[in-house]
Amino acid sequence: MNRLFPHLRGTPSAGLGRIARTLKSRNYRLFFTGQSVSLTGFWMQRVAMGWLVYRLTGSPLYLGLIDFAGQIPTFLLSPLAGVWLDRWDLRKTIFLCQVLSMAQAFLLAFLTLSGLIRFGHVLVIAIFLGIVNGFELPARQSFVVHLVEGRENLPGAIALNSVLFNGARLIGPSLGGLVIVAIGEGLCFTVNGFCYLATLAALALLKLKERERLPSSRSALTEFRQGLSYAWSFVPIRNILLLVTILSFFGLPYLALLPAFAEESLAGGAQALGFLMTATGLGSLVSAVTLAGRSSVSGLDRALAFGAGLFGLALVLFSLTGTFSLSFFLMIFVGLGMNLSYITANTLIQSLVDDDKRNRVMGLYVMILSGMAPLGSFVTGLAAGGMGTGRTFLYGGLVCAAAAALFLRGLPRLRAATARSAVAARDRT
């Protein structure tokens, strides 16, 4: 892996060793176990919902619309949620969000199995889940800090979270595709509902120290503006967030359009779609395990540029293929580049941000990561309806590759700003 991708500087054995050290934290181990079950169910639902919408409508436009409707609440809510999370109990917040997510899964299962399901039902349920995720995703990002023993384990925990997420992506979609072919989408939604019980049990078993939550005399909007000003004025964080914005808007919507691509370009069905998403998860899992073996954040900025470039170029090549075997192979590199970009961006931001701004900056990060994608999905859904999914993937990949080149060109200025910030922090102490 390192000979192919020297910017990663990790080894599989080192990655496994760091994972083992991180899992020694009892709280993190419990949360990791619960999430591994819940996220597998989530990815089963993701592929089932996409296939259900395409079966009901036969339109890539509606695929983009459902992704837009499901994630736009996250875009709107997560920045302010980052402010409110400073005042709320993170465990109770995540617990409530998991209960609400379980309820939507069972409702979706009932409507599908009863034959009552219509596109409008899926649309409303997607919006509801997006509202829940607007609070749950930034809460989960910040919660990791309180689960690991020793801040030196934080980078490993972030990478391990991605191993978990993409391991579920590796298993969930393929299982979902097989279940859809054999029985239908309704069972996928039912399984997902029961999977949430694993995280609820893990949260109940955690032993955490009480975290002091100081009341603030400032309004949530004022604190949000302060966090936004901090992120924009600090050049390294600003450049990272801008790159993630472009990747999320122009590249990440490929996930929403995959059902149409599998049907139109590959003449495949739900099973082909499941395997394509599995290939994405495989590449993402490889990048996550490799990054977990890194001993420091040195060089992660170049790894971020490399990952973004790989994501864009692989997406371009994927758009030009018409065979399933080659598409599967290229989708591995799409997943590898995409996940490499997002893990390194997350790790760099968590390492650079001031502790008192962490929740607010992570709220912005979640807004961009999970909120810009629906805007991109809506636009690319319109584009795909006019010029086809293949050409839409092509142009999106080219934009991502160009953004990576610009980020790489600006690295000297980014590193100089980081060095100045480190000196100023030492002077303050």
Image (spheres, rainbow, N blue to C red):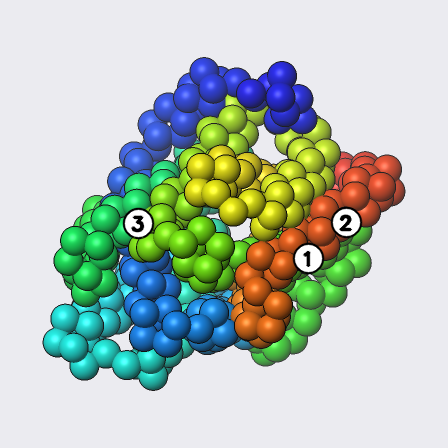
Residue underneath mark 3: 271
Q: Secondary structure at mark 3?
A: helix
Q: Amino acid at mark 3?
A: Gln
Q: Secondary structure at mark 1?
A: helix
Q: Nearer the viewer, mark 3 or mark 2?
A: 3
Frontmost residue, 377 versus 316: 316
Q: Which quadrant is the C terminus positioned in?
A: top right
Disc 3 to disc 2, how far (Cα)?
Answer: 33 Å
Q: Is residue 34 left or right of residue 323?
A: left
Disc 2 to disc 1, how far (Cα)?
Answer: 11 Å
Compare marks 3 and 2 and give the one earlier in the sequence. Answer: 3
Q: Is residue 429 left or right of residue 189?
A: right
Residue underneath mark 2: 402
Mark number, residue 395:
1
Compare marks 3 and 1 and give the one earlier in the sequence. Answer: 3
* Residue 136: % across, % down: 40, 62
423 is higher (above) or lower (below) than 70: above
Q: Amino acid at mark 2?
A: Ala
Disc 3 to disc 1, how far (Cα)?
Answer: 27 Å
